[in-house]
Amino acid sequence: MKFRPGDLVRVQTFAPTTHVRTPAYVRGKQGWIERVQGEFRNPESLAYAGDGLPPQPLYMVGFRQVDLWQDRYAESPADSLYVDIYEHWLEPSASLEGTQ
Amino acid sequence: MARTHDMGGRPDDAPLNLEEHTLADWEVVADALSVALGTRGLRTTDEHRRAMENMPADDYLALSYYERWVVGTEALLVEKGILTREEIDRKMAEIEATWGVS
């Protein structure tokens, strides 16, 4: 496990045309590790009849809604959104400031 | 650029319709068949998602939720050599002739 709850992370900006479980709207966004969900077989391999091994750590990652949607989400600035993201889609981030 | 199925935030900010709705019988069967194939080890949920996501965008957007499931299931059955398109088409013709539907 590379990350622990409370760690700040940024989602990678990969844009594959193959099957992935990381929605486009969180790519490049900063958030925090809310919870470690465990290790699971990798869906990016399972989707093509692979064995999904080795298992990949999966984290529940929290985002501020305003960081994801900017002025499209101005009504409830305290709201958060949680997305399950596999470890290889995450990199460490120093700060939540300046999030775009 | 998000792929067609990856619709978070698109096409606009209009609220989602969250009303409950009943499923048609064929939709229940479509779900049951897909899950049964998984239980038999003939396909994974991720393969099913991949098959649906690989549909041409115009097809994907024109189909309802469970219509996509059926297309995905059919694509995997053919890909894995479990059924052929000809077998599926022949059975469909039989059903249409028997029930007077298309």
Image (spheres, coloured by chain):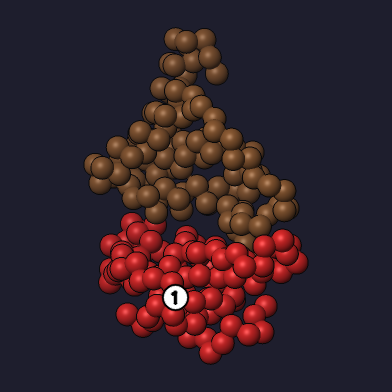
- For image coordinates 56% across by 87% down, the residue present is A95
Between residue A82 and residue B2, name the one nearer to us: A82
Between residue A11 and residue B26, name the one nearer to us: A11
User: Residue B74 location, x and y as percent?
Assistant: 43, 38
Q: Is residue B97 above or below residue A95?
A: above
- For image coordinates 67% across by 78% down, the residue present is A100
Q: Is residue B89 visible?
A: no
User: Residue A9 location, x and y as percent?
Assistant: 50, 80
Residue A46 found in image quarter: bottom left
Q: Which chain is brown?
A: B
Task: Please name the amino acid that badge 1 sits on.
Answer: Ile
Q: Is residue B59 above or below residue A45?
A: above
- For image coordinates 26% across by 42% down, the residue present is B39
- For image coordinates 66% across by 84% down, the residue present is A98
Residue A30 found in image quarter: bottom right
Name the colour assigned to chain A in the rendering. Answer: red
- The residue to which callout 1 is attached is A33
Between residue B53 and residue A37, name the one nearer to us: A37
Q: Is residue B95 visible?
A: yes
